[in-house]
Image (tube, rainbow, N blue to C red):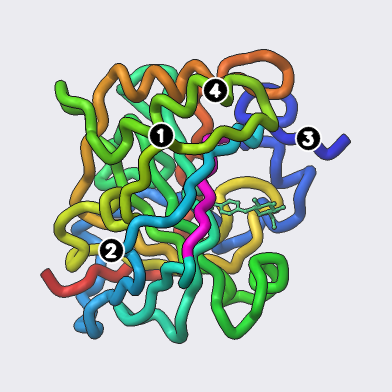
Amino acid sequence: GSEWTYTGQHGPLHWGSMFQSCAGSRQSPINIETLNVKQEYWKPLRLKNYEKAPSKMRVKNNGHSAQVEIDAPVAPRVTGGGLKGEYIFAQFHFHWGADSTRGSEHTIDGVRYPMELHMVHYKGSYGTLGEAVKRRDGLAVLGVMLEVSSNDNPALAPLATALLNVTDADMFAEISAMYPLKAFLPRNIEKFYRYEGSLTTPTCNEVVTWTVFDEAISISERQLNNFRAMMDPHGGKIVDNFRPPQPLNNRKVFVSAE
Ligand code: BO1
Ligand code: ZN
């Protein structure tokens, strides 16, 4: 079928021949060269309802990643920071390595992090995620780097535990304790990198305004190992589920004022 993977004959080097958009010229992720960014003085990034704990959170093993969805009376959203319009939260998910020498999708001056979190939002005026992925400004994804700490990250603890109940593809589990989405972002959200890119997985739609925060959050090796225990539909471990950096081509990368 049209199944894609992170290794072998259906891996990232072959996505372009399987999915036309994956061969496009505004693909993600990229290596962010901090000496080659242009400073912009936008209004602050504004997060709404990021401080309220959702009423429910559940995690799904979608065969490629751990994806978290929430129930909230009012959906979290993001505006400002140079975004045109309001973007509504849809889900967050992760990319990680088999070991902590790799795992992130974006790299900063060539540095790879052991994990990267993506907070996916779609433009409210487009109504649904399905409609938004057809529009060049349809999605806003917030990217957060994770770095290894000797301590567990408390906000990731209930999720890391729930992962043990979704080891097989297509399994869901409730997360037992809710943290606000803000708990999954760095303290400093004022400094971020911005560029126009794509979904990092097939179908690689070129519809994403990327925001990658400069500051990382932490995770322990023990918590990372719970992600690395998840299995894909073929019974292999989900590890190294990151796409390598793509050509920048005719694009600029911006940095927010510090
Ligand atoms: S990411 O944040 O760039 N890694 C990313 C990648 C894929 C999606 C969202 C964010 N979404 C996927 C949906 C699929 C859908 C596909 C193409 O987009 O999960 O259901 O088929 O529209
Ligand atoms: Zn992602």
Q: Nearer the viewer, mark 3 or mark 1?
A: 1
Indicate which disc residue 3 carries: 3
Amino acid residing under circle 4: Asn
Residue with the mark numbered 1: 159
Q: Position of residue 10 (x, y in %)?
A: 73, 30
Q: Are marks 4 and 1 in contact (CB under 8 Å)?
A: no
Q: CA distance from mark 3 to mark 4?
A: 24 Å
Label 3 CB-ligand 1 distance < 8 A: no
- Label 1: element kind: helix
Q: Nearer the viewer, mark 2 or mark 3?
A: 2
Q: CA distance from mark 2 to mark 3?
A: 37 Å
Q: Are marks 4 and 2 in contact (CB under 8 Å)?
A: no
N-terminal-most mark, 3 or 4 = 3
Residue 112 lies, with reference to residue 21, above or below; the image says above
Residue with the mark numbered 4: 165
Amino acid residing under circle 1: Leu
Question: Which quadrant would residue 233 be assigned to in this image?
Answer: top right
Q: CA distance from mark 2 to mark 1?
A: 18 Å
Q: Position of residue 70 (x, y in %)?
A: 50, 53
N-terminal-most mark, 4 or 1 = 1
Residue at the image point whose x is 33% and y is 64% from the top: 50
Label 2 CB-ligand 1 distance < 8 A: no
Residue at the image point whose x is 23% and y is 34% from the top: 153
Q: CA distance from mark 3 to mark 1?
A: 27 Å
Q: CA distance from mark 4 to mark 2?
A: 27 Å
N-terminal-most mark, 3 or 1 = 3
Residue extent of the magenta highlight: 65-72
N-terminal-most mark, 2 or 3 = 3
Residue with the mark numbered 2: 51
